[in-house]
Image (cartoon, rainbow, N blue to C red):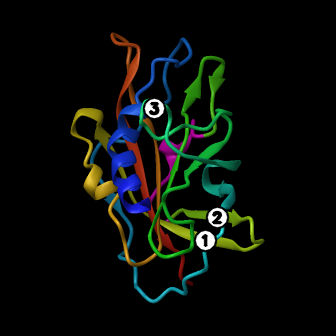
Amino acid sequence: MATAGLFAGGAVLASSLVTTDAPRGLPPPVRDTAATTAPPFVPGTPRLPAAPPDRLSIRAIGLDTRIEAVGLAPNGSVAMPRDADQAAWYADSPTPGANGNAILAGHVDSAVGPAAFYRLHAVEPGDLIEITRRDGRSVHFTVRSVRVWPADGFPSEEVYALTADPRLTILTCAEWDKSTRSYRSNLVITASPHTD
């Protein structure tokens, strides 16, 4: 069942994002852990039928990358993209633009250097996100909140909540710990359909 998969996967996605395969050197900077928010979303945005996402673009940070569909990894966590320069869409979550909470994830870096989400920490409330879908339609979202959550206090039920209206949630690693050579937190961006 997709709903069960979303919550089961959600609980382990946070831990799967804490990785030890970061390159040597300084990690990218992250925002303060305090939440920042944009004006509230006004319900009533037209919903689109389901169609898998193909590309993710955030012009404010110069991000334009392909999206690959992923499921669960053998250990039960949500799989990350095979190519660190791409984003992943958790295929048991709704498709962007359809009703519900669409989940995207990706790497900040890899063993060879910066990855697709290296500058995701620079996203701010009010920034626009464009998702190009495989049906040829583009869906635009406005960033509503940017939060950093510690991995050991990750609010899975809040982040992966089922929603009646379209929502986009994007996750990546944050706060590199030199002593453990792993990320100790997750950056979570929440966005709602853009309205003119």
| Secondary structure of residue under mark 3 | loop
Task: Point out the stretch of residues depicted in magenta.
Answer: 117-126
- How far apart in space, not on screen, are marks 1 and 2 (Cα)? 5 Å
Q: Residue furthest front?
A: 1
Count of numbered circles in the view:
3
Q: Is residue 72 left or right of residue 32?
A: right
- Which amino acid lies under the numbered mark 3 shown in the image of this protein? Pro
**Quick one: label 1, few (<14), some, or many (20+) residues within 10 Å?**
some
The foreground one among 154 and 100 is 100
Look at the image and tell me in which quarter the N terminus lies.
bottom left
Main SS of residues in magenta: loop
Seen at 43% across and 30% down, the residue is: 75
Label 1, secondary structure: give it. Answer: strand
**The quadrant where residue 113 appears:** top right
Above or below, comparing residue 187 to residue 189 in the picture: above
Judge the density around disc 3: few (<14), some (14-19), many (≥20) Cα neighbours within 10 Å: few
- Residue 122 location in percent, x, y? 51, 46
Tell whether label 2 touches label 1 (CB within 8 Å): yes
Mark 1 — residue?
A: 140
The residue under the point 65% across, 33% down is 82
88 falls in the magenta region: no
Whether residue 83 is visible, yes or no, is yes
* Other-residue count near label 2 (Cα within 10 Å), few / some / many at <14 / 14–19 / ≥20: some
Residue 25 place in picture, x, y as percent: 53, 13
Which residue in the structure is indicated by mark 2? Answer: 130
Q: Quadrant of residue 138?
A: bottom right
The dot on residue 29 is 3
